[in-house]
Image: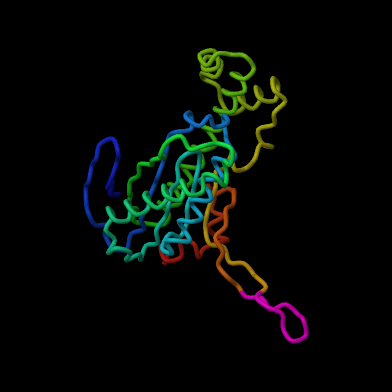
Amino acid sequence: MIFLFDSQFRAVVSTQTPPGQPELNRAAGWFSAEHAFEKPNDENALNLMNSCAVSMLEQFPDIVFAYGVSDEYSFIWKQTTQFYQRRSSKLLSLSVSYFTSVYVMKWKEFFPHKELKGPPYFDGRVVCYPRAKIVQDYLAWRQVDCHINNQYNTCFWMLVKSGKTQREAQELLKGTQTKDKNELLFGQFNVNYDKLPQMFRKGSCVYRKKVEEVVKLDDTGNPVTRTRSKVVVEHMDIIGPKFWSELPYILKEECD
């Protein structure tokens, strides 16, 4: 893998990625505290991120898949992309700048009564993975991380909102396993973790889905349909093979 940018270390290892390898961009931002986002999940903030990701796929046809959780998004570029001659510095700067610009433009759509207090900013980095299976493993890791963090944060903020200090909540959760957290949520707060919105538990997948759409009516009034690719946001399991086997065209070139 090739790491091309990191805001902390400012490391540039290469200026061009090897041909025949899919690329991955990841952007993450941190300013939820400044805007008093709801804890542990602010639905409007998450939907804003999702909307920005949709714009990314609409703007850059070579992005084939995106996965978002909390304040980060990962974008998978197709293996054969020749966008800007595969110059990773260009791919990174364009991706992050466009995502940030769209975030600002769409802010009022999702927070009509909340002013943007300052310019949002995202860091990013490019990683080059040689095979589709490694890309799938990466995305599975991000979704596992989404579940672990969301379950912990849900417990943590429920305890804090019930009157515990943050330190007390941390101590109560120290060493707990998945089963313990589920029992805590249900026993103390009557919350069934499995019933929480899938967006919180599984994150968001953005990709082009083949859908049948009515394009016109024929002379007899019957609908005429066409199969089109539509950018969609869905929340499903991508850890197992089912999603990828049912939609092989997403990473088709990488699998060939």
Q: Is residue 247 left or right of residue 26?
A: right
Viewer-proximal residue, 35 or 144? 35
Write the residue at 30% across / 39% down: 7
Q: Is residue 144 left or right of residue 87?
A: right
Relative vertical location of residue 225 with respect to residue 112 in this rendering, above or below: below
Q: Does 102 appear in magenta? A: no
Spot occupied by residue 23 in the image (x, y as percentages of width and height)? 35, 55
Spot occupied by residue 84 in the image (x, y as percentages of width and height)? 29, 63
Q: Does 225 appear in magenta? A: yes
Write the residue at 61% across / 25% down: 181
Spot occupied by residue 82 in the image (x, y as percentages of width and height)? 32, 66
Viewer-proximal residue, 48 or 203? 48
**Display coloring:** rainbow
Please state the extent of the stretch shown in magenta in the rendering: 215-226
- In the image as oriented, which residue stretches furthest toward the bottom? 219
Spot occupied by residue 220 in the image (x, y as percentages of width and height)? 78, 85
Write the residue at 48% across / 61% down: 58
Viewer-proximal residue, 224 or 65? 224
- In the image as oriented, which residue stretches furthest toward the right? 220
